[in-house]
Amino acid sequence: MLADGGKNSAMGEDLEKLKQRLPLLDYLRQQNWMGRPAGHGPEFVGLCPLHAESRPSFYVNVRKNLFYCHGCGQGGDLVRFVQLSRHLSFPQSLAYLEQQIAPADPADVLEEAAAFYQQQLPRHSEALRYLEQRGVHDPALIEQLRIGYAPGGNLRRHLTAQGYPRDLLGRLGLVNRRGNDAFCQRIVFPCRHDGRVVNFYGRSIGTVFAHRFLPGSKGNLFAWESVRQFSPVILVEGLFDLAVLWQAGFRNTTCAFGTHLTLAQLEQLSDTSGRRVYVVFDQDQNQAGQQASQALALRLQRLGLTVSLVKLPAGQDPNSYFVRGASAADFALCLQGAKAL
Ligand SMILES: [Zn+2]
């Protein structure tokens, strides 16, 4: 009896702490309850979240941290409210609330967003059409790269329903100040680091602001965990270049999200001495791509790598080359034709 009594009072203390950490009114507001002060006292009033009504009869007393509805007669504390509103048992409600107040791990949020985007892709023909236009059609590859689509408008609702606070979504850059999905109408590739999603690359399926990332690290070389076993390695500028090359069987392709490599990316490339690297950047008409390739090649050579600059037909990048009908054999010929510097 004594032991039990001790346990119960300890649980009671925890329960009090939990209710202090997440006051009922704060919780209700997180759930989008609109309450206004009822007079000058400690009470707020609004429409009852537990029954349908058109005139507000749901009262929250912030001093007592309790609610009461004059319409449906329900009342109690935060845990009671969770039990009623989410149809959970008392222990389930406690577990749910513990999760609500635990600081959310940004990596978990990004993982959840990635899963959401992935689910959306097959439901939106405009997104599938865009992928097809960019030469990406292998379902196994789309699954492996976890390519998704952001239709816009429903990401915030989805993530807040999972219990992730809206301000965290804003801080991560997933939603903008108005609460809209930052990747709206974009094909989305998750970028990973050590197996965890750290960023997204979003490619607009329209014409505005073609490329977008979240603020913060892009996670070094793309898919390096699986590419690092190879020599030679093929280095491309963008994820659509990578996707068509993987699809054509060149799984030794990685991407640096542009032509300027970070120190961390250079270190990754040179983690095996003497590795051969094929650099296949865009063949821009204005020579900018070639200049970037040259500068990078010199840098990589100094790190002990064997570098070849691969020439594609004028004006092409690996993606457009394949979209225009090039085969794996055509691309292999381009690799063979590239001389080591
Ligand atoms: Zn009610």
Image (spheres, grey):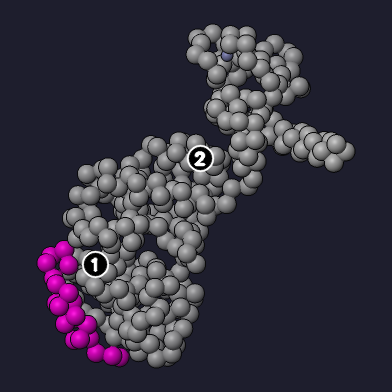
Q: Residue furthest left?
A: 325
Give me the residue at 66% from left, 17% from top. Answer: 75
**Residue drawn at x 60%, y 19% as measured from the top left:** 35
Mark 1 surroundings: few (<14), some (14-19) or many (≥20) residues within 10 A: some
Element class at badge 1: helix
50 or 206, which lies in front? 50
Pick whichever of labels 2 and 1 is earlier in the sequence: 2
Residue 277 visible in the displayed image: no
Which of the 4 image quarters holds residue 77? top right
Q: CA distance from mark 2 to mark 1?
A: 34 Å
334 in the magenta segment: yes
- SS at circle 2: loop
Disc on res. 156: none
According to the picture, the residue beneath numbered tag 2 turns out to be 162
**Mark 1 and mark 2 in contact (Cβ < 8 Å)?**
no
Instruction: Check residue 304 for magenta coloring.
Output: no
Q: Is residue 140 visible?
A: yes
Residue 193 percent location from the top left of the image: 48, 65
Q: Residue at x 42, y 41 (%)?
A: 155
Q: Is residue 340 above or below residue 250?
A: below
Q: Give the residue pinned by disc 1.
A: 247
Residue 216 percent location from the top left of the image:
50, 59
Point out the image quarter for the N terminus: top right
Look at the magenta stretch and give its main secondary structure: helix
Per the rendered image, the range of residues in magenta is: 322-341
Front-most of residues 280 and 268: 268
